[in-house]
Image (cartoon, rainbow, N blue to C red):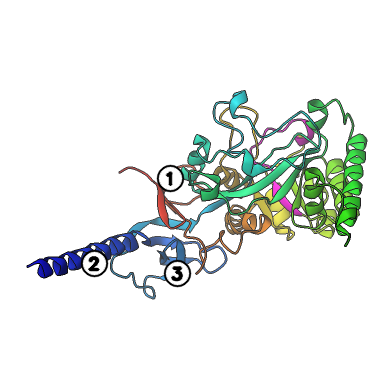
Amino acid sequence: MFTINIENMIKYILFTASLLFVIQFTEAQIAVKGETVYTVTGETIKNGIVLIRDGKITKVGSASKVKIPNGFKIYEGKVVTPGLVDAHATVGFSGIYNQKSDQMQLDKSSPIQPELRAIDAYNPQESLVAFLNSNGITTVHTGHGPGAPISGQTFVAKTVGKTIEDVKLDDATMLAMTMGGSVHSNFKTPGTVAKEMAMLRSELIKAQEYQKKSSNSDASKRPARNLKMETLVMLLEGKLKALITANSSNSIMTAIRLAKEFNLKLVLDGASESYLLIDEIKAANAEVVLHPTKARGYGDMKNMSWETAGILANVGVPVAIQSGYEPYVPKTRVILFEAAIAVANGLSFNDGLKSITINAAKIIGQDNRIGSLEKGKDGDVVIFDGDPFEYLTTVTTVITNGELSYEVKK
């Protein structure tokens, strides 16, 4: 009797374990059906299906070619796109309450602080992050904001997760810098663009010297660790891109000169008057993260245009559209709406979708994981009940990392 009970107990344990495995495995299997599926990098599919297993896309195709296996949880709607990618924001640093306690995007104690790490200040549980996810943004490039010659580092995160370790796709992506504009109102020095440029060049020259000394084969002759210099060396070596907020044509050219002198990987941020410098931007191989289309046009942005995204895209400059930073409530814009306005003003539908998916993913260095619906990429999918750029359209379902992260209650 005792032996039989042991055998039964073993069978029960094995059965329970296998049942738990099946349940967990089933939950990790999702099929998304759409009347129209925009893959972004491939053909648009009518009556398409996207299969996701264990957080990754395994198949994308028409319903006639892709069979949904048994046990897959099915979500469906009219239009399916990849998870949207916000190319530049301060969300998670700037919070919803607009109070000192939730405004961590800019430290004004010093104008040049490259050593400030984004991963140390980001709050993945900030309510604005969840708000973006509910609007289809599954990935955000965020960090220290504009307003200082160098305000600090940025990084890339998913919009679902409790801790930095849960959400981060990298530790550091770019170095946030600003030319002109708010810099001169935030700091006594620099008070002019010429002074700012002199300060930046001086620090980068110091970093070149630090870089050279650090490579000395004699350890005793290497300099003591310097976090500021270490970060600037990463910039010089191309491990970090230079994200330079520059809106006026003069500021844009100043940014281009700095990047050329020190061989920096340049990402122009804001770029309100970029339509005046198309040849110069192309010659500099600069990437463009355009300002929110509906941003307020004042100061350095007084000559912004709703048509800029279309102008740049039409001459072959890949454009990503950002949510940016707003110094007033509600503290963040939604790239879906910003791109929609650009589409209504000269940007094609396909380029509009690319501006908030694959173009953004390429600029932030994550196009191997996100930005399109392709086999092997992260299971980030958005379902709409109509044209994504139509104002009355609703995001009905968001899947992030192969799991349901948002769904409209029926």
Q: Give me the disc on residue 212.
A: none
Report the residue at 74% width, 30% height from top: 298
| Secondary structure of residue under mark 3 | strand
Foreground: disc 1 or disc 3 = 3
Magenta span = 287-301
| Number of the front mark, 3 or 2 | 2
Q: Is residue 163 left or right of residue 361?
A: left
The image shows residue 118 at horizontal and vertical percentages of: 65, 43
Q: Give 401 or 18, whichever is nearer the viewer.
A: 18
Which secondary structure lies at badge 2?
helix
The residue at which mark 2 appears reads as 14
* Amino acid residing under circle 2: Leu
Q: Nearer the viewer, residue 386 or 132?
A: 132
- Residue 241 location (% of width, % of height): 75, 53
Q: CA distance from mark 1 to mark 2?
A: 45 Å
Q: Mark 2 packing: few (<14 Cα in 10 Å), some, or many (20+)? A: few
Query: Marks 3 and 2, Cα distance to the nearest angstrom?
Result: 29 Å
Residue denoted by label 1: 394
Residue labelled with disc 3: 58
**Which of the two discs, 1 and 3, labels the residue nearer the N terminus?**
3
* Residue 231 sits above or below residue 7 on the image: above
Q: Total label count? A: 3
- Name the amino acid type tagged 3: Thr
Give how far across and how far down residue 370 sits, in percent: 56, 59
- Does residue 168 show up? yes
Q: CA distance from mark 1 to mark 3?
A: 26 Å
Q: Nearer the viewer, mark 1 or mark 2?
A: 2
Q: Residues within 10 Å of mark 3 (few under 14, many from 20)?
A: some
**Disc 3 + disc 2, Cβ < 8 Å:** no
Asked if residue 300 is among those painted magenta in the image, a careful observer would answer yes
Q: Secondary structure at mark 1?
A: loop
